[in-house]
Image (tube, rainbow, N blue to C red):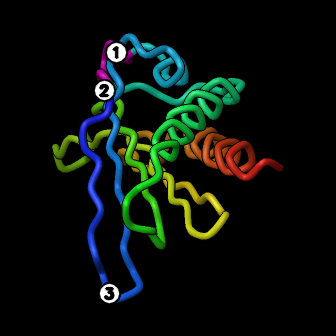
Amino acid sequence: MKLFDETHEYGEADSRRTIWHQFGETDDFVNFIFSEPNPEYGSRTVVAADYAPLAKALKELIEADLLPSPENVTSETHWVFYTGVLDGDAIDDKVRFTIYVRLKGSRYDCNINMSDFIFASSFDNVQKIKASLEEYLNGK
C-alpha cells in the first residue's frame, strides 16, 4: 500500500521525490524471505531463497510510481518499502526491516535497514537480497 509521495526542493536544480510503501503480513513477495519467529527470542532470520519474486514485485511498484510523469523533473527518486518485520535489538529498540531504493540518473541503488540480530544471523542473505534487487532493477 502506498503511504506517501512527496517531492522536495534541495537546491535550484535539485529536487528529490520520495515514495513510501507499507507491506502487510500477507504480502508474500516480501515476507516469504523471513523464517518463522524464533519461539525463544521472537526474532526472525532471513532465509536463503530466490529473491527474484521480491525484485520483480518491487520493480512493478517502482514502474507504476514512475508512470505518471511528475510535474517537476526530479534529480533523484527514492522508495522506502516498510515491512511488518520488527525485531528488538540489544538495547531494546525496535528495528523495522526496511528496503530502500534510489534512482539517480539511470542507476538504481539499494540499501536495507536491519536489526543487529538480522545483521549477526543473516547478513549474507541480506547482501544477496540487495545484490538481487540492484541487478534486477538495473537490468543486468
Query: Which callout, 1 or 3, points to the residue nearer the camera?
Result: 3
Q: Is residue 130 left or right of residue 78?
A: right
Q: Position of residue 31 (x, y in %)?
A: 46, 20
Residue type, numbered disc 2: Gly
Residue type, numbered disc 3: Gly
- Farthest bottom residue in view: 12
Q: Which mark is residue 25?
A: 1
Q: Position of residue 130 (x, y in %)?
A: 61, 48
- Rendered residue at 54%/35% (across/down): 58
Q: Position of residue 53 (x, y in %)?
A: 65, 23
- Above or below, 74 relative to 12: above
Q: What is the span of residues highlighted in magenta in the rendered image?
A: 37-42
C-alpha separation, residue under disc 2 versus residue under disc 1? 6 Å
> Magenta region, mostly helix, strand or loop?
loop
Q: Which residue is mark 2?
A: 84
The local crowd at label 2, few if under 14, some if 14 to 19, many if 20 or more residues have their Cα within 10 Å, is: some
Q: Secondary structure at mark 1?
A: loop
Residue type, numbered disc 1: Glu
- Above or below, 103 relative to 63: below
Q: Which residue is mark 3?
A: 11
- Above or below, 138 relative to 118: below
Q: In front: 87, or 101?
A: 101
Q: Do the residues under discs 2 and 1 have CB atoms within 8 angstroms?
A: yes
Q: Secondary structure at mark 2?
A: strand
Q: Name the N-terminal-most of marks 1 and 3.
A: 3
Snapshot quadrant of residue 98? top left
- Farthest front residue in view: 71
Q: Which mark is residue 57?
A: none
The local crowd at label 3, few if under 14, some if 14 to 19, many if 20 or more residues have their Cα within 10 Å, is: few
The quadrant of the picture occupied by the N terminus is top left
